Image: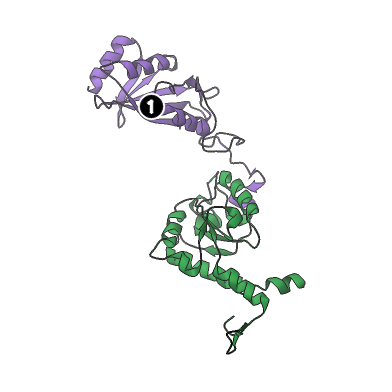
Amino acid sequence: MIFEDIKKSLDQQFPDLVLVAGEDPFHFITIALNKWSRLARFLHNNKDLKFDSLHCITGIDNGPENCLEVRYNLFSMTHRHWLEVRIELDRTDPRLPSVEQIWRTADWLERETYDMYGIIFEGHRDLRRILLEDDWEGWPLRKDYITPEFYREMPVPKDKI
Amino acid sequence: MEHDVRKSSDNIIISSLDKLISWARSTSPWYFQFGLACCAIEMMATAASRHDLERIGMMPRSSPRQADVMIVSGTVTLKMATRIKRLYAQMADPKYVISMGSCATSGGPYWQYGYHVLKGVDLIIPVDVYIPGCPPRPESLLEGLLKLQEKIRHERPISEKLK
């Protein structure tokens, strides 16, 4: 299915769903936060779309003045088509529904996004840090992150040694 | 040891216990089998048939209790650093540490902006031999290990204790 057809079938199912659509470099749609949970289930279950594979979840920080963003790269093994879904989040309280129970691979991907950006995936059954230590403070890939001077009495920046 | 050995006709070797112990230690420094990053691949290559660490008496041990040498082979993240400290404490004396590659020595490519990397493993445990390289070739690691053996061979464990 080509992107125009995917978009048409989404428009039929959810009117006013797609805020922005384009190609950069993959075909993407930007949607509102509150539609994501229903859309995810539809993308996964609809027999014409059947996005059965979630390739990647990316967190993006657009700068201290701007929003956080999450991008999902979906692929259909059955129909061989791609779609990128973008969702913009409020910086002060970044929350969005988890898709961990729809695509099982989202389990670790969401944990990593949480680990690096502090984005909370509501409904995730085991949302804790995956790469960093549990007692780590802050979200390292955010633009306004300040590197700690010491971690468990070990110096972190070079000039502290 | 070679210089002091006097051979009698009855196959008796006379040496000092000091030298015997340090010679025995130097020829069988078993290393702790664990790797941290890409340096570990070179360490595996060094242990494999072409370079063959066992010909200089080095054998991998999977438990810190049985190991004499810890080869810190790769990037020491802060999360791993706490584990390394504990593993080093679990090793029995005498114990030696080799810092392999630029990451373990100084943080490597993460020395400036790595929020998660310890800038040199010598900040948490004492290091005997540093091996430069990114990653060091097996020849470099072998050179470092032979240097460590040389260092161990020049130790005098008993006379140092009696001092």
Mark 1 highlights which residue?
A: A72
Q: Position of residue B40 (x, y in %)?
A: 46, 54
Q: Nearer the viewer, residue A65 or B7?
A: B7
Task: Give whichever of A27, B46 is nearer the camera.
Answer: B46
Look at chain B in the picture and name its colour.
green
Q: Is residue A63 above or below residue B27?
A: above
Chain drawn in purple: A
Three-letter amino acid code of the residue under disc 1: Tyr
Figure check: A66 above or below B158: above
Q: Position of residue A87 (x, y in %)?
A: 42, 22
Q: Is residue A68 visible?
A: yes
Residue lying furthest bottom? B9
Residue name at image x 57 percent, y 50 percent: B118
Identified at 56% across, 46% down, the residue is B80
Q: Residue furthest right?
A: B163
* On screen, residue A10 above or below B129: above
Report the side of B6 relative to A65 (left or right): right
Label 1: few (<14), some or many (≥20) within 10 Å? some
Closest to the observer, A95 or A122: A122
Work out which quarter of the rendered image holds the C terminus of chain B and state it.
bottom right
SS category of the residue bearing label 1: strand
**Residue name at image x 57 percent, y 43 percent:** B79
Q: How is the image coloured?
A: by chain
Note whether residue B124 is visible: no
For disc 1, the chain is A
Quadrant where the N terminus of chain B sits is: bottom right
In the image, farthest residue toward the front: B10
- Residue B88 in percent (x, y) is at 62, 54
Q: Position of residue B19 (x, y in %)?
A: 64, 76
Give the total number of marks visible in the rendering. Answer: 1
